[in-house]
Amino acid sequence: GDGHGTHVAGTMVAIGNNGIGVVGVTSNASMPLHIGKGLGDDGFGSNSGVLAAMESCVQSGAKVINMSLGGPDASGAVEEFLTKLENDGTDVLIVAAAGNNGDSSFSFPASYNSPLVMSVAAVESNGDRAGFSQYNNQVDIAAPGVDIKSTVTMNAGRDFGYTSWDGTSMASPHVAGVAALIWSHYPSKSVADVRTALECSAVMPEQYGDDVKNNEVGYGVVNAKNALALLEFSDFSGCPTIAPTMAPTPLDCSEDIIEIIITTDIYPSETAWVLTNSCSNTEVASEDNHPFGEYEYTTKICVPPGGEYFFRITDSFGDGICCSNGQGSYNILYNGESVASGGEFLNEDIKIFGQCGTPPPSPAPQVTATPSVAPTSSHSPSYPPTTTGAPSQVATFSCPSGQVEFSLTLTTDNYPEETKWVIKEGFRWQTGTTLTTESFGTYTSSQTTYTETICIIKNKSHYFRINDKANDGLCCDHGNGEYSIALNGQEPFHSGGDFGKKEQVKFMAFPDYSDMQAFTIEIEREPKGVYFDWTSEDEEENS
């Protein structure tokens, strides 16, 4: 051949980390390929030859078909084939080059009006549509297509090398590679899920303003990390009509509130931040998972009064979040007043605010016959009673629409100060967002039952982790402590207490357990004397 197919394949799957040549989108050498030859060695062919190659790929079980080819004429036979695939429910995504005529004409197969076909435009390094890239209302997404270096064969296949080419043929395999990559992580997802994840997570170059979709670059430039995150969360319902703002969870707090507002640039995965209490030298909150570019993320944290706080924001590329690649920014509000802001920095920016010394107020005691303490607010700690007597009237707890009630009932052992817990929202513990936490020393009464209730986002994945500082759990070496967790006032879906350093529960926040045929949770329990994932966090927990 003329090396065109080899160039395309290299962009998708060239092996990485070997110090040779280029690195493909799926570079770990484990992605199976099926080669369908639709054109002749001279780069020309017919619709029947293209259709035969498509059929061969589908019959071989391909989930993603890249088609770096095209022509001006549609084929009734190909349209019928696509319709049959759709009607049969075949999960296959066909990614095709938009064409290189530099006008608004349609090129096929990219421009077939099928939910199984994506048309890919080419962009330059600055995000502009490449001058040769065709533009029309069938363009779905864009990818790099100018000066793309990849693998080629030369001298009728006798030699092998690398060269840089331009074309929508070079852009298409970027998208096909990302589609295959994210689908390999979640193989049970449908073709509609994968397509929606690619489109809705694409980053619109800033020169196109507030467009959500246009004829030049479709929904924007493909972004693998964004697409994987969106497919992972699976809470999309089509692309938004305006750039959405990530809505924060409402926070009812009787103490101080710190609100951290991050607006990402067009490379959101480069941004991370951490907030530390300088007085106690403890981490309060952190976040390194920002799936969407040019979005606003808000984190609200309930903290005791009188702290000094150290805020550090980083950019892994070293160009900050403003203004080289978008108008990113950050703003920190302390009890509603802005105390720090910025965006123009290189690798990191650090701000310090607040002042040590003011003790937190003592909460009013709850009077109960058996020491069960209702939360003082949705995110503030509950404290043990100082007296006993007639049961107190507990206010009804309700959550806003779109959220569910998460309740923790915890009975301490003989060493209550050794217990801490945290609840996070997210599919991975390491990148989850901390919703609320109780630290060592919060609980001071032994063999006492506490009840904590907060609102969490429904149909989202969450983690609950409980720790014991002495590595002997809540039960049964030093008393019969235990805990249970439940949703929306139902019976507990998990309970425990007999663990070592920690126990962790991953669950989906379904409003009603019957919403699932089986309410599935994942549990990691560290037995006494065994440490299964020692981290720097564990060092802090034992300090």
Image (cartoon, rainbow, N blue to C red):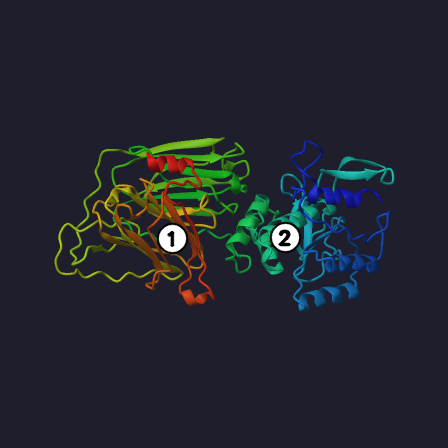
| Label 1–label 2 contact, CB within 8 A | no
Q: Of the numbered discs in the image, which one, if any, rests on residue 249?
A: 1
Q: Secondary structure at mark 1?
A: loop
Residue drawn at the location 76% of the way across and 58% of the way down: 54
Residue 132 seen? no
Disc 1 or disc 2, which is closer to the eye?
1
- The quarter of the image holding the N terminus is top right
Relative side of 67 to 218, left or right: right
Residue 409 seen? yes
Out of 86 and 258, give the one closest to the viewer. Answer: 86
Q: Secondary structure at mark 2?
A: loop
Out of 249 and 16, give the one closest to the viewer. Answer: 16
- The quarter of the image holding the C terminus is top left
Q: Of the numbered discs in the image, which one, if any, rests on residue 455?
A: none
Residue drawn at the location 24% of the way across and 50% of the way down: 382
Residue drawn at the location 67% of the way across and 50% of the way down: 176
Task: Report the Cα–Cα distance between label 1 and label 2.
Answer: 32 Å
Residue 421 coordinates in the image, percent (x, y): 33, 46
Q: According to the image, label 2 marks what residue? A: 218
In the rendered image, the vertical position of residue 543 relative to residue 336, given as above or below: above
Mark 2 neighbour class, 10 Å CA radius: few under 14, some 14 to 19, many 20 or more: many
